[in-house]
Amino acid sequence: MTAAAIAIDASGLSRTFIADQRPVHALREVSLRVAAGESVAIVGRSGAGKSTLLNLIGALDRGYQGSLRVFGEEVRAMPDRALSRFRNRQIGFVFQAFNLLPNLSVGQNVLLPASFGTELGHGERVERARYLLGEFGLADRFGQMPAQMSGGERQRVAIARALLLQPPLLVCDEPTGSLDGETAAHILGVLHGIQRTHGTALVLVTHDPQVAQSCDRVVRLDKGRVVDAVGAA
Ligand SMILES: Nc1ncnc2c1ncn2[C@@H]1O[C@H](COP(=O)(O)OP(=O)(O)O)[C@@H](O)[C@H]1O
Ligand SMILES: [Mg+2]
């Protein structure tokens, strides 16, 4: 793989938290490579380190040991402003708890990534936000407030928001966790469609074996270590 073809290159990646003055080794020497356009499912029991790994991959956490390059950039080495800009342009992140802003409408939430600067004009942004909401079955919800929506609907708004600027890397913590089977299958189809047409790398955490199997590779974490990696490298 050439450098440009690698979305994520982690080697010897460790993350230790201190809780009650004791170290918690959330990740231990994880090595993981994800190619551009590849999809990888991260699975494992609760507490295995999945969210910790996603936060690192999503460049939300720089407190690691080892090396983590995202599109060739060592995450820890990027200054704050450069990192914010990098995240905004390169990474779409779907939080497990969605993290929608409650005082903004659905449409405003989806448009949020564009407020940090983008080449897209106002009309284009709104058109794109409406298109994405339509893809997720929420075409008529643009002006609604998140509090008026179900968990599954909010989850889809969060995914639409992550996709607004067409980032080359999409990171999702249980993107179908709040969805019924049929909606989950549809959303998964949309995500893999984006992966194929835009060459987007997709890293997701899931407890659903069907979701995991829809990905090119499955990586299993246990107690902070990669114990099993299945699929084409
Ligand atoms: N900010 C933190 N401070 C202290 N411990 C943490 C923190 N975040 C995660 N942990 C611990 O790290 C381990 C892995 O957590 P996490 O990555 O959330 O697991 P998973 O997402 O697989 O359920 C757990 O033991 C958790 O309690
Ligand atoms: Mg988690």
Image (tube, rainbow, N blue to C red):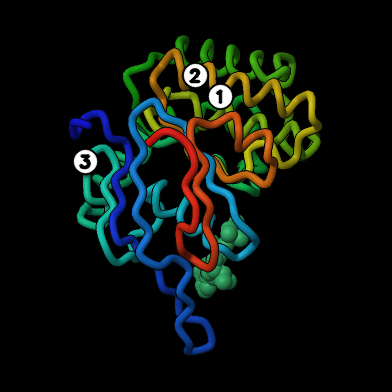
Q: In the image, ligand 2 is in what quadrant?
A: bottom right
Task: Identify the residue under disc 2.
Answer: 194
| Mark 2: few/some/many CA within 10 Å (<14, 14-19, 20+) | some
User: Amino acid type of disc 3?
Assistant: Gly
Under circle 3, the secondary element is loop
> Which residue is drawn at the image coordinates 35% and 64% (left, top)?
29
Tell me if label 2 and label 3 are in contact, CB under 8 Å.
no
Whichever of callouts 2 and 3 sits on the residue coming sooner in the sequence is: 3
> Which residue is drawn at the image coordinates 53% and 68% (left, top)?
223
Q: CA distance from mark 2 to mark 1?
A: 5 Å
Q: Position of residue 228 (x, y in %)?
A: 49, 52
Q: Quadrant where the N terminus lies?
A: top left
User: Amino acid type of disc 1?
Assistant: Leu
Q: Which mark is residue 191?
A: 1
> Which residue is drawn at the image coordinates 49% and 47% (left, top)?
219
Q: CA distance from mark 1 to mark 3?
A: 24 Å
Tell me if label 2 and label 1 are in contact, CB under 8 Å.
yes
